[in-house]
Amino acid sequence: MKKENLTDHDRVCAVAPVTVAPLKRHVFVCNGKSCTEVGSPAVKEAFRKELSERGLLFGKPAKGGSFKGSIVLTDCSSVGFCAVGAAVLVYPDGVWYAQVEAEDVPESVESHLIGDRTVERLALLKIPAIVENPEK
Amino acid sequence: MKKENLTDHDRVCAVAPVTVAPLKRHVFVCNGKSCTEVGSPAVKEAFRKELSERGLLFGKPAKGGSFKGSIVLTDCSSVGFCAVGAAVLVYPDGVWYAQVEAEDVPESVESHLIGDRTVERLALLKIPAIVENPEK
């Protein structure tokens, strides 16, 4: 299906409230087969509940979110942490957490998402920040 | 199912080759209903092919990747760009692209993923980098 693209920037923003939200972070919970088997759906639900209760979750109010939320929470497909799930990725920090369980979520929210301090005992990988090309 | 966690850091890395890959970026293609209807699977396949041909795709060789690849490519669930799909997110840059079509992919790879220059005509949102708390 070929769509008709929107070209007016204001019109695009009007149909996508996320563009004007005060976004700070994006949390991905892996929904690959291995991560799912070790409880990633419960991990995602724990994030949803914790972020919702604190008013931090971006999204529709009917799903516990707010359009003024600062944190986006979504699934992602397998990232290669299959043996050490559940995998949780926090961007733009670039921190990949392994072996996350639902009971680790309150600490992750408090320390990392609110306090800006990585939970070192669960962090297995960090993708460094990118310096944008100045010759753009 | 309660799993037995791996506690030896070296052992964890051995079972997850991604931990020792020279990762630079993570590209997410939205697989939500709306994005899928406007061609997000073709967009993802275009990224897979383009990155694979250039030796940049992280992943199993059987799927066109390399364990020395610098770019991870996965799906993600809906991010709220439902009216302006297909949505493509590039992290850790925090750039959210809207209305991406398969034919935009070679330019995106060349300009952004290789040249570190955002494709401004498609970029709709940028999540700024986080300054880590120094009191960790």
Image: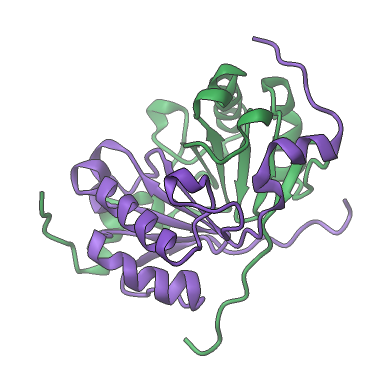
Chain colours: A green, B purple
- Asked if residue A118 is positioned above or below residue B94 in the image, the reply reads above
Q: Return the residue found at the far top.
A: B1
| Of the pair A65 and B98, the residue shown nearer to us | B98
Which quarter of the picture shows residue B1? top right
Q: Residue at x 47, y 37 (%)?
A: A77
Q: Residue at x 62, y 75 (%)?
A: A131
Name the spot of residue B130 as percent of width and height, x first.
67, 60
* In this picture, residue A28 sits left or right of residue A66: right
* In this picture, residue B111 sits left or right of residue A25: left
Name the spot of residue A46 as percent of width and height, x first.
61, 23
| Of the pair A58 and B89, the residue shown nearer to us | B89
Q: Mark yes or no: residue A121 visible.
A: no
Name the spot of residue B71 as percent of width and height, x first.
53, 58
| Of the pair B112 and B132, the residue shown nearer to us | B112
Name the spot of residue A128 as percent of width and height, x first.
69, 62
- Asked if residue B121 is positioned above or below residue B60 in the image, the reply reads below
Marks counted in the figure total: 0
Q: Mark yes or no: residue B40 visible.
A: yes
Which quarter of the picture shows residue A130? bottom right
Q: Return the residue found at the far front.
A: B62
Q: Residue at x 58, y 53 (%)?
A: A24
- Asked if residue A36 is positioned above or below residue A126 in the image, the reply reads above
